[in-house]
Image (cartoon, rainbow, N blue to C red):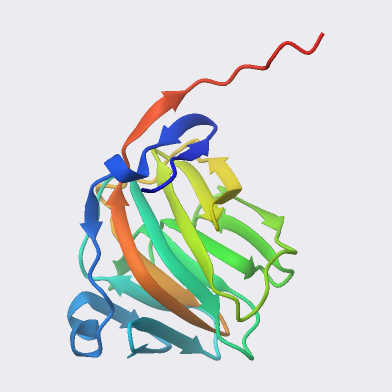
Amino acid sequence: MNTPLLIMGKRIEVDASPVIWDRPFASKTLTEHWDARGGEWEVDGDALLGKSRTPNAFLFSRSRFPGNVLLDFYGQTVLPSTHDLDFMWNTDWDEPTQTRTTGYVCGIQGWWHGKLGIERPNSLFGGMVPCPWFQPGTEYHIQAGSIDGHCFVFVNDALKFEAIDPAPVDSHRFSRVGFEVYQSVIRIRALTIRQIAWTPDPSTYPDEF
């Protein structure tokens, strides 16, 4: 049983959130299910390995996942790589310009100064916080996504970041998920994608005096 995820005003019922993707990474189906845009991507056992000595190397899902989605996976940097465990959702790739269009891009131990946060390309939306707890080479359980622009990141069952986009991405138009290597090496396994089911969770203060 999965523990519900609590963010401001919302209770995400993980077990009630339908699974819409849970296929394991496999060498023979990597190009069938995933679209590489730069970098080196391969499967080792049941894990996806991504590597790039340059910024902005992407791997996009070929499938689309419209609406509010939760990405649930185990991820780490691969030593000697120490930074940028990066992933994204509500995104897409623009063929004419050969660029990522929009979407929510999460980085852990990124932004050159060891931050965790979310940014949205071609937008002023974004935010980040330090993550001194991050240990290169250590595997973390990551749960991240958004509800109508209310973005969140949980690491090992603890809420590490949330922010609300005042002009949310059109998640029906932009609906791919993916990973990014930014002068880094990452390892991803056990990816599950869920359609988020949630209920309101009003907050009150207890009487203190």
The answer to which image quadrant residue 33 occupies is bottom left
Residue 14: x and y, percent? 36, 44
**In this view, 131 is above or below 184:** above
Left or right: where 155 falls relative to 19: right
Frontmost residue, 137 versus 182: 137
- Taking the image as drawn, is residue 183 in sight? yes
**In this view, 99 is above or below 122:** below
Left or right: where 160 falls relative to 166: right
Q: Residue at x 28, y 40 (%)?
A: 16
- Taking the image as drawn, is residue 98 in sight? no
The answer to which image quadrant residue 40 occupies is bottom left
Residue 26: x and y, percent? 25, 84
Frontmost residue, 93 versus 181: 181
Q: Residue furthest front?
A: 1
Frontmost residue, 177 versus 54: 177
Residue 12: x and y, percent? 40, 38
Q: Residue furthest right?
A: 209
Q: Residue at x 55, y 58 (%)?
A: 156
- Counting every numbered tag in the picture gives 0
Tell me the quadrant of the picture where the C terminus can be found: top right
Residue 191: x and y, percent? 34, 67
The answer to which image quadrant residue 41 occupies is bottom left
Q: Residue at x 24, y 53 (%)?
A: 19
**In this view, 45 is above or below 192:** below
Q: Residue at x 36, y 48 (%)?
A: 1
